[in-house]
Image (tube, helix red, strand yellow):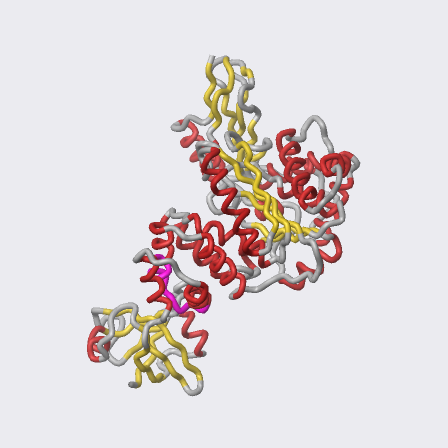
Amino acid sequence: MKFKIKEVKLSSGGPLIGILNNEDSTKLDLRALDRIKVKKDSREQVIAIDVAKSKRNISPGELGLFDEVMDILKLKNKDIVEISVEPKPLSLDFIKKKLDGTTLDKMEIDEIVKDIVENKLTEIEITYFVSACYRNGMSIYESAYLTEAIVAHGKRLNFKTYPILDKHSLGGVPGNRVTMILVPIIAAAGYIIPKTSTRSITSCSGTSDTMEVLAPVEFHVDEIKKIVRKTKGAMVWGGVLELASADDKLIKIEKVLSLDPEGILLASILAKKNAVGATHVVLDMPIGKECKLKHKKDARRLKRKFELLGKLLGINIKAVITDGSQPIGFGMGPALEARDVLYLLQNNKEKMPKDLRKKAILMATTLLQMVGVKNAGKKVVDILDSGKAYTKMKEIIAAQGGNPKIQPEQIKIGKFRYCAKAKQEGSVKEISNKYLTKIAKAAGAPTDKGAGIYINVKLNDKVKQGQNLFTIFAEDKKKLEFAIKIYNNSKVVNVEK
């Protein structure tokens, strides 16, 4: 059947979607989410359809198309195309099997991932897969198959060398910029560490948001290889690389539903490590009541799974359980965190965050021990104290197009600020990571690089009435006012006599 194209001038964000009028869909015995093949000359594409009940938007004889399909088929408004009915993707049968509680094999999971990457599944259909994995769980082998499929259907960084080191944190702790200390330490020790990181998903700054204060983070694969060959290290945003594009689509669905199926979490992390060719990975697993992992027993169980999955994938993984009960460092927000990093690398004893230094030393030591370095802890401290890590950081900043001479005081922070003071004398019994993050985001972080929070206290510190507990920074006065409102309605730092 021939149809006239109507450009709907909307983007689906990935899935290939068309719209038929109800009369045409009835004639063709098609329902929403059924498939049709659209053909124009030698170009053809299978898409999913939605059904318009009214003639007001899509008339009989018209096929409404979203931007993605218009671009793929190089169509113009009012072009004539031919359509035919197509069977639904085979992967939908496998998703239904998972919904029924059946364990999927390698081929079935690969087919699902392939169809996700090729935009053959709608977001609703991907949601069913995520929900099935959340409800019914995944075996360790399913997670391994999912990891391999995500890597197989994405781009890869291939350095053709051994070993390649990497690090990942499960997150949930503001100010935890260990990566920006660890990468220059490892690179200065002579090992390759091509660190791809995320921007903020739920935090007030991701590693890429903070690194972007010092240097650009968006590069193509060949550019990253060039940076790493020159400096042995890099800190770049993984989102632009499509190293694990299926994973990005799964994360998008998980965010909407606030779901984080454990089997997909395992595959998501290790797919990104596998895609950069990592052979040794240290994993930071913070525990605390506001972290993803609340208790040690949960962390130990997940640690065993990560390490077992690593063996199945040929990656040496060491998971380290860490304290997530309070922020790491002083700054929360891109500019404030970047200042912390530079003060630490410069060995500024007065201004460096000692807890960030201690944790970075632990994680870097663990990683070097994994590759057989003797006296790894002493080597890490020597690299920090001698200034070699700072020199390497300046090399990485320069290679990524930043200013290696930048000093912490030159990094601009928000000019609007508010000091939160202790209402009574006592000791700090609790600090809420969740509310600190919420306030910093309300102040504008991470979009406004200079926004965020600088905290002056740690757990068990003694404080006096009226003492400054933390300062909120904002680039916009109204955002500061909004952040103050959230602070006034939250219990952020609990001081008890």
Q: Nearer the viewer, residue 447 or 147?
A: 147
Q: Is residue 146 visible?
A: yes
Residue 460 vertical placement versus 191 (above, below): above
Q: Nearer the viewer, residue 285 or 487?
A: 285
Q: Is the N terminus in the top left, top right, bottom left or bottom right quadrant? A: bottom left
| Picture quadrant of residue 89 | bottom left
The x and y percentages for residue 256 are: 38, 51
Q: In this rendering, would 100 be left or right of 238?
A: left
Residue 125: within the magenta?
Answer: yes
Q: Nearer the viewer, residue 345 or 375?
A: 375
> What is the span of residues highlighted in magenta in the rendered image?
118-127
Q: Residue at x 55, y 39 (%)?
A: 333
Residue 207: within the magenta?
Answer: no
The x and y percentages for residue 297 are: 46, 35
The x and y percentages for residue 163 are: 69, 53
Q: Residue at x 42, y 87 (%)?
A: 41
Q: Residue at x 77, y 43 (%)?
A: 391
Q: In this rendering, would 136 be left or right of 201?
A: left
Q: Residue at x 47, y 24 (%)?
A: 430
The x and y percentages for residue 183 are: 67, 45
Residue 291 vertical placement versus 146 (above, below): above
